[in-house]
Image (cartoon, rainbow, N blue to C red):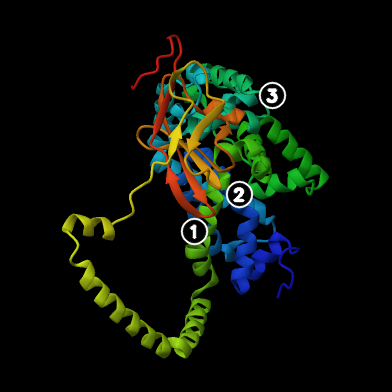
Amino acid sequence: MIENVQSATDEALAAEIARAPGDRLCTELFRRYSKKIYLWSFGYTHEVEEALDLSQEIFAMIFRNIRGFSERSRFSTWAYQVTRNHCLGELSKRRVRWRDRLLSFEDGAGAEALETEVFSRVDAIDDLERMLDAAREYMSMDEIEAFVLHYREGLTVNEIAKIVGCENVTGARTLIRDGRRKFGRLVEEKASEMSRSEHLDLEALEKYLLGKLEERAAEAARRHIEKCALCDLELKRLQRFAGVDSDDDLARTAEWIYARRKLENAFSEKVAPSAAGNALARRIRFSRASNAARWIVPAAVMAAGVFMIAYFSKREESRVSEPARRVVRGALPVRYGIELGDPAGEIHASPTVFKWKSERGDNHYALEIFTPTLARVYRAENIAGSSWTAPDTLGTILKPNVVYLWSVKGFNGLERVEASPNGWFRIARGSAAVQSTP
């Protein structure tokens, strides 16, 4: 039994959950890994809701298969393997949708590196790994790694720069462009001469990374990694997974503050009850039933009184005209008490400040930017005042000559009390700004 879950190691928590799962243990493990797994999933999906779905599926798999975790490796390595395998498995099913989203997600300056026909050529290769093994004779290690991360796994240029270790995205684009050119020539000229090589498994890579291999084994691993781009890439992925939750830029792009609440709610409602096991769920239900029996009789009497009051009240309501009844029974109409200001219409540069006016002067506001198909691009919450200064990352998300809608909602505490109609703007390139509807 672990008394202090906050100070327990990941491995100890996993072993205890495998032996006797409980809400407290599962919640602590979720707390430690929720941001890592969500941000890693977002790197593949490039969209918040799908990344949330993927994260829930991964946590369900982790808790369902946690007895298969071997303490020969760190828990973080095992969690990375589950996360990576599930993302790549889903990539094979959703490749087209994620890839289209990737192409729209990248900024205009990187469009030249994103030749869509290369994706199709890579998909058509039956034994891509064998081709990549032999590619080191014609491509640099960094070129192979950037090529794989972009054309095989669909990561953004910004994320590739962080994994490969480029100083900026321009370096990553150069690697992708050069790798694409060399790989195309390689496929045409040398495909029949290529053979497969062996790779290090994750356990060996982890021990090499932590300096736990014996001297001779460590030297052999080092020589192999120097020659094998795929093993070197796997090592860099492992390092990236360990630190991805400290990437503030990615967290803002992935709307982590918004996603965190939804992921926590989904975990408590869906994943945690399943992880705790059927026996624990039955005990909880029995305990609740026992407690319910203490107040069910007086509650029934009270409910009967409420029903009688409601019945006679409905008789008065039935005299209301049919249109009025529809308003009473339906959702309250939205109050447009917020008037949007800037940005509006066509503008010359990415907006830096969003302004609006509120009739009420609410406690705080939430701002959303989305496409005409209602795919959300950005969300900012808990805004005090009637303006919001956009972060620099927003400029890398918004694309030129694309119409974006935006709206603001006003809140008093947790209650939404007013909203704005949708406004729109478009970053015009090569044309004058015109204040007109699209």
Question: Secondary structure under badge 2?
Answer: helix
Q: Amino acid at mark 1?
A: Ala
Q: Residues within 10 Å of mark 1 (few under 14, many from 20)?
A: some
Q: Earlier in the sequence, mark 2 or mark 3?
A: 2
Which mark is on residue 266? 1
Question: Residue beneath label 3, please?
Answer: 167
The answer to whether residue 212 is left or right of residue 350 is right
Residue 93 sits above or below residue 180 on the image: below
Extreme-right residue of the structure: 215
Question: Can you tell which of label 1 and label 3 is closer to the viewer?
Answer: 1
How far across and how far down the image is residue 127, in percent? 46, 34
The answer to whether residue 419 is left or right of residue 20 is left
Q: Earlier in the sequence, mark 1 or mark 2?
A: 2
The C terminus, quarter of image: top left
The answer to whether residue 13 is left or right of residue 412 is right
Q: Residues within 10 Å of mark 2 (few under 14, many from 20)?
A: many
* Cα separation between marks 2 and 3: 25 Å
Question: Residue beneath label 2, please?
Answer: 35
The answer to whether residue 156 is left or right of residue 163 is left
Residue 262 sits above or below residue 309 on the image: above
Q: Give the camera-side residue of 373 and 172.
A: 373
Residue at 77% from the left image edge and 47% from the top image edge: 210
